[in-house]
């Protein structure tokens, strides 16, 4: 027995070494070339599935796990943008430390045996504030962003060259033996090119010359750019590129899908968008067939968190949470599992897909067969795909090569031996899960909190910036803060006293505004993601100006900066018109009037959200909550549960929160949709937490209730219902053959059920090996199951034997 154990251990070590060697080989670079069929690495054609994971939207401690889960899901390439405004905070001053360590991120990808798709931009959009551009660029004289403009081109070239040179010094491009096989410049320029006219066309030509001259040794792409200059490859972004992509603008360029949207980003005031696993799988496979696609990048594969003030206008702090890996780094099922099976099925037929001859023909009224033949089209059928594009209706029976098949609506079946179905995009065998938020600690006692009320500045307090007109919010704050105080005072106007009371009317370009008269709030208003501008009308209090001076303080608030559109350097925010209509209907215009300004909150400047800064102000005992412009602080110990952590801020209004001096992002729990708050939970990375004595500071703008704030943990739900099935050869693809000789013997399938960590299968409600009725398809599970005409009486007994396992695989 001892000998057996030793032998198993030796075999295990050898196996691990072989896996490590294979992973290392997979990440090894080589010459990257391409033709009209695919990218080629070291002379070998590649069918590549890529997943976007942005290094600043998670933490360095999370990177290894995220990359590992992507690899396990069948991802070959990790894609990331480079975030200019993250790295060059001031002109010529760079930061690549900590969460900004893009080199460390790429090396982690390489260590796990994956390739890298580097999207430099440096304009990236990406729901990043200002599209990733540094706000200080606005102050460059004569600058016009993203155009044939010399000032912009100088700074854009400097940053792009800085990034490429830095990565080349670390030998990270494939031509140097590194993992970077593909790079991108600019981002969706085709959306704005027309606005720049001939200067846009000149800019495009200059871009091509710039990146080719950097000598990276890898191809460059431009997404949504049908006129991408040679040798840049034009690529597609969207949800249905198998239908919408016009194709490469040269027969010598491959079809690349740079953004296959796995969901949609969410904005405050909007509900989350869920894109089903079946829809993603269908359009991914359709792109491969209809467009000869060979490189598909899921945007996002893991969205993560918009920490701090990094999100663009109105975008929530969680980002693409419905991606295959959720905000907290957990697999979102069945999306993750279904795509994993798709990847395995496609790769099992990569040879004929990349080198075979495709022939397609109808097999039904609107159903098609895509068949690939080897040996230049003279050989036998190598792999076949049966496509039913009909979105609705009942499954359609079709005949192919004397075989009968049933195609569900909007589905594609894969037949790697041209006979047996191993995968159908509409048939989900991966189990479903959901995320459960469990309360770890609630801060429900007044003695747990202290508060510091921000003073409302008056005109006499705002002496550092004065003007005789309304100033633009962005140009004044330079994005140092979301907040800008506009202050003015009046006693007489045009030698006439404004009569008692009246209406204050403010027109703002966005995004939110709070109005105070003599220190008391009299109104608030905000715009939306689709319409950031708004009007605010507030009733002036009676007696506000009976005698003496009336002070009006406007707190203008941005919620991130716009991330797209032409001429971003001209975009403005904040009040553009302020008038008072008195009770005699006389309108007094204050646009040209003495104004004072204060950038940011006093608490921001003192950094009261840090241990040191908190000591700079006088904190008082908690009063009654619901106070506007108030800071709250408390301390807490780390949850004992080994799970991701989130703050439940559903009882708060709007503001920002910090843990141990690090911003977990903006919150806006009060911005409701008919379904409730757009975002209730806010991710707190485990690596930011100490075992005890953690400092939580919350800045509340509107007046929320901190007594209902809680610290929660996130786990996959303890499944109330777990469902999976294998049908007609369709199921998990652990046994898909890798060579032609074995394709004709594909019969074994695996059915998998897996419970969360530290849980077990408590009950088996139904089991049938045969022809059961009921469905696990899509995102929901049928509530009723029935035995069919064919049924094995041993089905339940077989499963009951292993019921106490947390994971079990049944071979069929």
Image: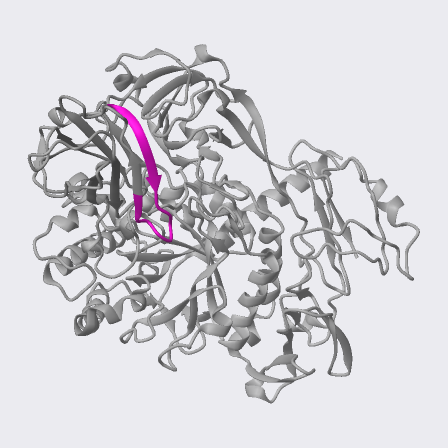
Quarter occupied by residue 607: top left
> For residue 536, what is the image quadrant?
top left
Left or right: residue 121 compared with residue 718: left
Residue depicted at 63% across the width and 45% down the height: 11
In the figure, 622 relative to 498: above or below? above
Front-most of 11 and 608? 608
Residue drawn at x 33%, y 23% as measured from the top left: 630
Pick out the residue farthest to the front. Answer: 584
**Image point 45% across, 12% down: which residue?**
446
Q: Is residue 524 magenta?
A: yes
What are the residue bounds of the magenta stretch? 519-535
Q: Quadrant of the N terminus?
A: top right
Q: Quadrant of the C terminus?
A: bottom right
Q: Is residue 608 magenta?
A: no
Residue 674 position within the rendered picture, expressed as x and y whole percent measured from the top left? 53, 44
Q: Residue drawn 33% across and 47% down?
A: 313
| Percent coordinates x, y for residue 762 in the rendering | 78, 35
Residue 667 relative to residue 335: left or right: left
Measured from the top left, where is residue 377 in percent x and y? 58, 87
Between residues 443 and 84, which one lies in front from this camera angle? 443
737 is higher (above) or lower (below) than 381: above
**Front-lying residue, 606 or 360:** 606
């Amino acid at each position: 027995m001892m000998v057996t154990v030793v032998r198993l251990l030796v075999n295990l070590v050898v196996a691990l070494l072989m896996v490590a060697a294979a992973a290392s080989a997979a990440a090894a670079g080589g010459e990257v070339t391409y033709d009209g069929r695919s990218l080629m690495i070291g002379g070998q054609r590649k069918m590549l599935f890529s997943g976007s994971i942005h290094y600043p939207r998670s933490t360095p401690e999370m990177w290894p796990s995220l990359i590992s889960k992507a690899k396990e899901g069948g991802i070959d390439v990790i894609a990331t943008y480079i975030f200019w405004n993250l790295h060059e905070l001031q002109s010529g001053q760079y930061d690549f430390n900590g969460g900004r360590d893009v080199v460390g991120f790429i090396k982690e990808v390489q260590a796990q045996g994956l390739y890298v798709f580097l999207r430099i931009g440096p304009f990236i959009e990406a729901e990043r504030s200002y599209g990733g551009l540094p706000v200080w660029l606005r102050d460059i004289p004569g600058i016009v962003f993203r155009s044939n403009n010399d000032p912009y081109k100088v700074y854009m070239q400097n940053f792009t060259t800085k990034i490429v040179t830095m990565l080349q010094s670390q030998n990270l491009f494939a031509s140097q033996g590194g993992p970077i096989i593909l790079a991108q410049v600019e981002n969706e320029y085709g959306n704005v090119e027309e606005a720049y006219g001939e200067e846009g066309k000149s800019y495009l030509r200059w871009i091509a010359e710039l990146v080719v001259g950097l000598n990276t040794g890898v191809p460059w792409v431009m997404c949504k750019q049908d006129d991408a200059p040679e040798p840049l490859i034009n690529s597609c972004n969207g949800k249905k590129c198998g239908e919408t992509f016009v194709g490469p603008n040269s027969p010598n360029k491959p079809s690349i899908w740079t953004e296959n949207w796995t969901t949609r980003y969410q904005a405050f005031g909007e509900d989350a968008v869920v894109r089903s696993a079946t829809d993603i799988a269908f359009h991914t496979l359709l792109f491969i067939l209809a467009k000869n696609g060979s490189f598909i990048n899921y945007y996002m594969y893991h969205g993560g968190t918009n920490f701090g003030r990094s999100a663009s206008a109105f975008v929530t702090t969680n980002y693409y949470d419905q991606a295959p890996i959720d905000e907290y780094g957990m697999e979102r099922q069945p999306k993750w599992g279904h795509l994993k099976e798709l990847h395995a099925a496609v790769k099992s037929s990569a040879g004929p897909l990349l080198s075979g001859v495709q022939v397609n023909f109808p097999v039904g009224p609107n159903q098609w067969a895509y068949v690939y033949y080897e040996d230049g089209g003279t050989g036998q059928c190598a792999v076949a795909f049966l496509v039913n594009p009909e979105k609705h209706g009942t499954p359609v029976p079709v005949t192919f090569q004397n075989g009968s098949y049933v195609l569900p609506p909007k589905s594609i079946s894969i037949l790697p031996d041209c006979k047996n179905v191993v995968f159908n995009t509409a048939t989900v065998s991966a189990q479903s899960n959901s995320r459960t938020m469990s309360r770890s600690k609630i801060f429900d006692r007044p003695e747990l909190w202290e508060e510091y009320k921000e003073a409302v500045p008056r005109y006499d307090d705002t002496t550092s910036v004065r003007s005789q007109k309304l100033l633009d919010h962005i140009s004044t704050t330079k994005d140092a803060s979301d907040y800008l105080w506009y202050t003015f005072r009046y006693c007489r106007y045009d030698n006439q006293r404004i009569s008692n009371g009246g209406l204050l009317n403010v027109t703002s370009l966005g995004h939110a505004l709070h109005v105070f008269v003599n220190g008391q709030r009299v109104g608030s208003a905000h715009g939306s993601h689709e319409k950031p501008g708004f009007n605010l009308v507030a009733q002036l209090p009676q007696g506000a100006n009976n005698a003496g001076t009336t002070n009006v303080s406007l707190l203008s608030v941005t919620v991130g900066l716009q991330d797209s559109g032409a001429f971003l350097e001209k975009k403005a925010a904040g009040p553009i018109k302020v008038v008072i209509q008195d009770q005699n209907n006389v309108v007094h215009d204050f646009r040209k009037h003495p104004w004072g300004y204060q950038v940011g909150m006093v608490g921001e400047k003192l950094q009261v959200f840090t241990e040191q800064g908190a000591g700079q102000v006088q904190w008082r005992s908690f009063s009654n909550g619901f106070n506007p412009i108030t800071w709250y602080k408390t301390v807490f110990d780390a949850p004992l549960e080994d799970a991701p952590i989130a703050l439940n801020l559903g009882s708060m209004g709007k503001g920002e929160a910090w843990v141990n001096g690090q911003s977990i992002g903006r919150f806006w729990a009060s911005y409701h949709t008919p379904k409730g708050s757009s975002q209730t939970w806010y991710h707190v990375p485990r690596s930011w937490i100490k075992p005890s004595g953690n400092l939580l500071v919350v800045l509340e703008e509107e007046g929320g209730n901190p007594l209902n704030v809680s610290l929660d943990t996130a786990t996959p739900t303890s499944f109330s219902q777990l469902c999976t099935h294998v049908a007609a050869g369709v199921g998990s693809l652990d046994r898909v053959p890798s060579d032609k000789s074995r394709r004709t013997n594909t019969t074994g399938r695996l059915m998998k059920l897996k419970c969360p960590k530290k849980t077990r299968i408590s009950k088996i409600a139904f089991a049938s090996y045969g022809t059961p009725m009921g469905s696990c398809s899509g995102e929901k599970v049928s509530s009723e199951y029935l035995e069919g005409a064919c049924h094995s009486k041993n089905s339940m007994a077989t499963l009951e034997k292993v019921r106490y396992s947390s994971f079990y695989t049944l071979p069929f």
